[in-house]
Image (spheres, rainbow, N blue to C red):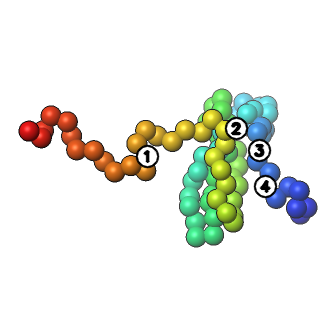
Amino acid sequence: MSSQFRDLIASELYCPKCARSQPVRERLLLILPDGELHEYLCRRCGTSLGERKVTGPRVAPPPGHRHPPGAGQPPRPPRGLLR
């Protein structure tokens, strides 16, 4: 395989359920010792359309990706219970 396609990220794939090419979103499935396994999902119907394995240094998240609120922070104590 040519090195120019090594880091290819799909933006559209054919969806058999929609019967046409559709935009996809990428979801992290597994973090493996040698990389990460990602799944491509149809943005319209949610059908799984394929996977890709990322090896080597960690890849930056796609533009517009947001982490859940409070991700990576220690939990806060409940409000109103401490006096």
Q: How far apart are marks 2 and 3 (CA)?
A: 7 Å
Estimate the x, y position of residue 55 in percent, counting from the top left. 69, 64
Q: Which amino acid does label 3 sit on?
A: Ala
Query: In the image, 74: left or right of 8?
Result: left
Position above or below: 73 against 41: below
Q: Which amino acid does label 2 sit on?
A: Val
Estimate the x, y position of residue 27 in percent, counting from the top left. 60, 46
For label 3, the SS is: loop
Q: Are marks 1 and 3 in contact (CB under 8 Å)?
A: no
Label 2 crowd bin: few (<14), some (14–19), many (20+), radius 10 Å: many
Query: In the image, 71: left or right of 17?
Result: left
Q: Which mark lies nearer to you, 1 or 4?
A: 1
Q: Which mark lies nearer to you, 4 or 3?
A: 4
Quarter of the image with the N terminus in it: bottom right
Which of the 4 quarters of the picture holds residue 80? top left
> Pointer 3: what residue?
10
